[in-house]
Amino acid sequence: ITHVLDTHLHADHISGGRAIAEQTKATYWLPPKDAEEVVFHYQPLEEGHNVTIGKTTIAIQPVYSPGHTIGSTSFIVDDQYLLSGDILFIDSIGRPDLAGMAEDWVGDLRETLYKRYKELSNDLIVLPAHFMVIDELNEDGSVGKKLGTLFAENHGLNIEDEAEFRHLVTDNLPPQPNAYQEIRETNMGKINP
Ligand SMILES: [Fe+2]
């Protein structure tokens, strides 16, 4: 392991990224806009800075894609795969991670999904961070679909009216985990449970 990358600063689980990086002496990459309060050394993950792994160049191209958090970053791997983190799923779209920021971040989310992702190749295979229902799995158990297919089939990518989109995203936001603030501070290295 030579590189560890987090798509965003997580609020719902303690990331293993830092521990893995420390144990393996790997480079730990974080989106700088999510990492303003981070107290340990990390490598800022910024658009245009490809991360090359191994001798065969598997370039990981970061794409700034805010909306779930302000720093959320997607990765294009090998011109074939789009690791969308918590921004886009197979059957749904991401939501602002902090309910208090929902109104501020919903515009970013729309911009990411409807403009930035729209400019990417439809042939990229989207690999999201998770799924919610079993229907999102392919027959072989994998979770991934072409971006073009998602633009055709995913309801969250097909809401023309901006106000309606805003409602869909900000209404009924799931409750934040009780410990989300401590989880975030742990991921920033500020506290150590
Ligand atoms: Fe997340």
Image: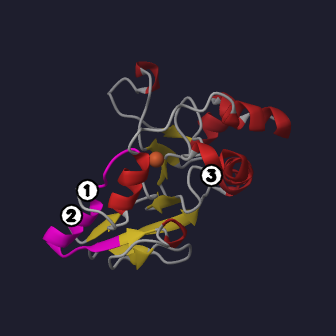
CB atoms of marks 3 and 2 within 8 Å: no
Instruction: Give whichever of discs 3 and 2 has the lower sequence position.
Output: 2
Query: Residue 162: x, y in percent?
Result: 83, 40
Give me the residue at 40% from left, 27% from top: 138
Query: Residue 38: x, y in percent?
Result: 40, 72
Identify which residue, 82 or 91, lies in the foreground.
91
Residue 57 visible in the picture:
no
- Helix, strand or loop for disc 1: loop
Instruction: Give whichever of discs 3 and 1 has the lower sequence position.
Output: 1
On the image, numbered disc 1 is attached to which residue?
A: 16
Density class for disc 1 (Cα within 10 Å; few <14, some 14-19, many ≥20) is few
In this rendering, the answer to whether 135 lies above or below 110 is above
Tell me the quarter of the picture where residue 164 sits.
top right
CB atoms of marks 1 and 2 within 8 Å: yes
Q: Which mark is residue 19?
A: 2
Residue type at tag 1: Gly
